[in-house]
Structures are given as structure tokens and as C-alpha cells.
């Protein structure tokens, strides 16, 4: 009998449990999911023996991997660690999932693409990462495929923000309290994603496999999920300031100026365009994707 048909089915191991997305996954989980969250220092994803033993002991029906080395610029100088955490160790989790017949949900990123497209990225578009972080995350995806695990979802997302995280929204609010003028990059286009919407989407995707009779053909594979719509970081920042003021924040900011990527050099190269097509997600789950402005309003309501 498959794990999805037993009590093991909705026992969910949440790896990287102290992180921004993981916190929201634990918060919105439907009541029939039993969540065990693990993170450093007690649980180190790069310790293969520990990963295999832990999973063998817990016997989850689902493993959700939110653990990652997410400091994109930091990865440029710490390539070995990035490759271990974001790449090699993801293979340990896939192997562990396979050994107990669990479904693995692994979170990946828009930075696996080079950003040269001008129409929304599809799941099977050619990857071509431009940074150490992007390369390491692509290695993680490849480790899942190489493990031979059939029951996996790789969910790529972009421009993530939510409670408990050191994210772009909080950075803009903080800077807007200190300065009268800001220059924000206007030539990178993407889709901000609220962790609340992504967390719900992950459960919607999971439900397609844990229902008593999963669809045929199986829903497993790669998914793109970000909020609907697109903007530049500059447009995102303007919306953040506008909502912050509406929500009673006292800001000093008077002007936000659009600047080019070259005017704000960072160690890691970012894609110029990384909007996702969410067609596959909507077709498989039957759910709509909330717009990024709606996600931002919801974040302001709860922060
Ligand atoms: N943030 C974004 O804008 C963004 C965009 C696209 C995709 N993603 C992906 O979305 C996922 C969740 O991102 P997030 O922003 O929620 O991440 P996060 O807040 O940085 O959380 C990651 C968690 O993983 C933990 N971790 C790191 N190394 C570990 C290890 N060896 N063993 C166990 N746990 C470890 C971290 O612990 P420490 O804090 O102690 O290191 C942290 O608690 C990641 O896969 C990320 O690549 C994020």
C-alpha cells in the first residue's frame, strides 16, 4: 500500500523549519497534517547519516524541504557550502524520501534561469543559472531527479517575502524611515511572492497526490508558483511605501528613483526577467493565483 493511503500519509517533515517560508507552511497547514519541523543546529541537512536515520525513524508521508543557503550574494564567496546545502544534500533528502515511500516537496528558484526571455517562463524552459546560488539550486533539482524518486514536486518561486524573514519589503520600510530618497533597480522584472500564498499553493499541490485516488497521469514534477502579475523592484518598492503609509507607518521618504542594475552592483548576477507561467499549477490544482498587490496587502494586514 502506498504511503498516501496510510496513517503515514499526512505526517509531514518540514526541513529548514525555522525559516521564513517554513514558518508560514506550519501556520497554514490544514488540521489533518501532522508537522514535525527540524532545522540547524539539531538537524543538519548536509549530514547524510543523520538525514537517513531521522527519516527512517519518523517515517513521514511527506517531506517539505525549505532549508537552503539563501544569501544570494554570500553564495558567491561560499560556493562549497552553497553546493553542499542547496545541491548535494537535497539528494540525501530525496534518497531518504524514496526509502520510506514519502512524497518530497523541494523549493527552488527563478534564479535557475538566465532571464533572457521576455514571456513567462514555463517549467520545461531551458535553465541557465547566472550565479553560484542559481547553480547550486539547479544542482539540488538535478539531485532529486538523479535519485530516481518518482513522488516529488519541485516548486520554483521568486521574490519571496513574508513574516519572520529578512525580506525586501522590510528592507524598504526600514530604509524609508531613515532616508528621504532611494534609488531602486527598475530594469529587473519579476513577480513578488507572499509566503502565505505560496504555502497555500504547496498544500494545493500536495492535495493532488495525497487524495485517496491521485489523478492519472500522476501530478508529480516541476511547478512554477509566484504571485500573478509582474513589476520591477522599483515598482514593488513604490507599492510598499504607499501601503506602509496607508498602514500608519511614519516614513521620511520623499522620492524613489528608478536606477539600472549597473548603478547598484552586487556580487551575484540576477535575471533581468523571471516572470513565471502558472498555467500548469492552475490546471493541475484548479486554483487561481492571487495577484502580487493582493499578496502585499495581506502581508501588511498581518505584519
Ligand atoms: N527568499 C527568496 O526570495 C526566495 C526566492 C526564491 C526561492 N527561494 C527558496 O525558497 C526556500 C525558502 O526560502 P526562505 O527565504 O524561507 O529561506 P530562509 O528563511 O533562509 O530559511 C532557510 C532555513 O534553512 C536553514 N538551513 C540552512 N542550512 C541548513 C542545513 N544545513 N540543515 C538544515 N537547515 C538549514 C536555515 O537556518 P539558518 O538560518 O540557521 O542558516 C533557515 O532556517 C529556499 O529553498 C529558497 O532557496 C527563496
Image: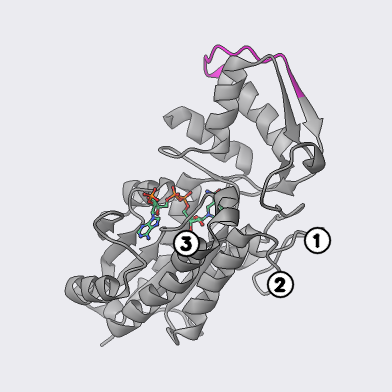
User: Based on the displayed image, in which of its 4 quarters is residue 275 positioned?
Assistant: bottom right
Give the number of the disc on residue 81: 3
Q: Nearer the viewer, residue 27 or 180?
A: 180
* CB contact under 8 Å: marks 3 and 2: no
For mark 3, give the secondary structure: helix
Q: Quadrant of the C terminus?
A: top left
Q: Which residue is mark 2?
A: 125
Q: Is residue 297 in sight in this rendering? A: yes
Q: Residue at x 80, y 62 (%)?
A: 117
Q: Is residue 240 magenta?
A: no
Q: Is 4 situated above or below 174?
A: below
**Magenta-colored span:** 246-256
Q: At numbered mark 1, what does the secondary structure look like: helix, strand or loop?
A: loop
In the image, residue 61 sits, relative to residue 118, either above or below, namely below
Residue at point 48%, 38% (across, down): 166
Q: Quadrant of the N terminus?
A: bottom left
Determine whether the residue tagged by mark 2 lies in a helix, strand or loop.
loop
Q: Dot 3: within a 10 Å radius of its alpha carbon, few (fewer than 14), some, or many (20 or more) residues?
A: some
Which residue is identified by label 1?
A: 116
Spatial CA distance of label 1 from label 3 is 28 Å
Q: Earlier in the sequence, mark 1 or mark 2?
A: 1
Q: Is residue 72 left or right of residue 18?
A: right
Judged by its main secondary structure, the magenta piece is loop
Q: Are marks 1 and 2 in contact (CB under 8 Å)?
A: no
Amino acid at each position: 500500500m502506498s504511503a498516501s493511503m496510510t496513517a503515514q500519509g499526512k505526517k509531514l517533515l518540514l526541513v529548514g523549519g525555522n525559516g521564513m517560508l517554513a514558518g508560514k507552511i506550519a501556520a497554514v497547514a490544514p488540521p489533518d497534517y501532522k508537522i514535525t519541523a527540524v532545522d540547524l543546529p539539531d538537524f543538519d541537512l548536509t549530514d547524510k547519516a543523520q538525514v537517513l536515520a531521522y527519516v527512517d525513524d519518523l517515517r513521514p508521508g511527506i517531506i517539505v524541504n525549505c532549508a537552503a543557503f539563501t544569501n544570494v550574494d554570500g553564495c558567491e564567496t561560499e560556493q562549497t557550502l552553497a553546493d553542499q546545502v542547496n545541491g548535494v544534500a537535497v539528494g540525501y533528502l530525496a534518497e531518504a524520501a524514496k526509502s520510506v515511500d514519502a512524497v518530497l516537496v523541494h523549493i527552488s528558484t527563478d534564479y535557475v534561469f538566465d532571464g533572457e526571455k521576455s514571456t513567462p517562463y514555463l517549467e520545461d524552459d531551458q535553465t541557465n543559472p547566472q550565479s553560484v546560488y542559481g547553480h547550486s539550486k539547479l544542482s539540488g533539482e538535478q539531485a532529486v531527479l538523479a535519485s530516481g524518486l518518482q513522488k516529488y514536486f519541485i516548486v520554483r518561486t521568486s521574490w519571496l517575502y513574508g513574516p519572520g524573514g529578512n525580506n525586501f519589503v522590510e528592507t524598504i520600510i526600514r530604509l524609508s524611515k531613515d532616508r528621504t530618497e532611494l534609488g531602486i533597480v527598475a530594469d529587473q522584472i519579476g513577480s513578488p511572492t507572499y509566503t502565505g500564498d505560496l504555502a497555500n499553493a504547496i498544500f494545493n499541490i500536495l492535495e493532488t497526490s495525497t487524495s485517496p485516488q491521485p489523478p492519472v497521469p500522476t501530478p508529480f514534477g516541476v511547478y512554477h508558483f509566484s504571485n500573478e502579475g509582474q513589476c520591477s523592484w522599483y515598482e514593488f518598492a513604490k507599492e510598499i511605501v504607499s501601503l506602509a503609509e496607508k498602514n500608519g507607518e511614519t516614513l521620511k521618504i520623499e522620492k524613489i528613483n528608478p536606477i539600472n542594475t549597473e548603478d547598484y552592483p552586487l556580487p551575484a548576477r540576477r535575471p533581468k526577467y523571471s516572470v513565471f507561467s502558472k498555467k500548469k499549477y492552475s490546471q493541475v490544482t484548479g486554483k487561481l493565483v492571487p495577484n502580487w498587490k493582493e499578496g502585499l496587502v495581506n502581508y501588511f494586514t498581518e505584519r
